[in-house]
Amino acid sequence: MPRKPPIVFPQEQRLLSALGERLRLARKRRKLSNAVVAQRAGISRTTVYKVEAGDPGATLGSYVRVLAVLGLESDINQLGADDRVGRKLQDLALEPAPKRHTAAHTKAVKPSSASSNEEPA
């Protein structure tokens, strides 16, 4: 029984489709056919078609193999390289917690008047 493809949200599908289109254009610029890329990558022509279509069912390994055939495998190092959110969270955890001033720790001081300390005559 074939497995179900993963659930992919529309924004993620757009990203996969755009990646597939860039790979297709890179293949065409190199004047390589689907069959040649498939043979060099050690995958089927159907899998190359799925990669170029941005099919979420294509494995990451298939994408990497196609990148390698096209000489673009070093581009995979750019994925997740600039983790701005993770660095910000880590920096926040390193900062000392600000001191809190609560009502229990602060005493209200009433100014004393000179007349209240005098005894009545």
Image (tube, rainbow, N blue to C red):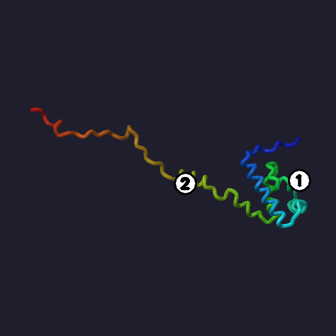
**Image coords of residue 14 (percent x, y):** 74, 51
**Image coords of residue 93 (percent x, y):** 54, 50
Label 2 neighbourhood size at 10 Å, few (<14), some (14-19), many (20+)? Answer: few
Amino acid type of the residue tagged 2 in the rendering: Asp
Residue closest to the far left: 121
Q: Earlier in the sequence, mark 1 or mark 2?
A: 1
Location of the N terminus (image quadrant): top right
Residue at 35%, 41% in the rendered image: 106
Please give the residue where the numbered disc 2 appears in the rendered image.
Answer: 91
Judge by depth and name the residue closer to the eye, 58 or 53: 53
**Image coords of residue 39 (percent x, y):** 90, 61
Residue 4 appears in which quarter of the rendering?
Answer: top right
Please give the residue where the numbered disc 1 appears in the rendered image.
Answer: 46
**Helix, strand or loop under label 1:** helix
Amino acid type of the residue tagged 1 in the rendering: Thr
Please tell me whether mark 1 or mark 2 is closer to you in this view.
Answer: 1
Location of the C terminus (image quadrant): top left
**Image coords of residue 92 (percent x, y):** 53, 51
Q: Which mark is residue 34?
A: none
Residue at 57%, 53% in the rendered image: 88
Q: Would you place residue 77 above or below residue 5 in this image?
A: below
Residue at 37%, 40% in the rendered image: 105
Residue 82 appears in which quarter of the rendering?
Answer: bottom right
35 on left or right of 73: right
Question: Do tag 1 and tag 2 residues touch (Cβ < 8 Å)?
Answer: no
**Helix, strand or loop under label 2:** helix
Judge by depth and name the residue closer to the eye, 33 or 6: 33
107 on left or right of 25: left
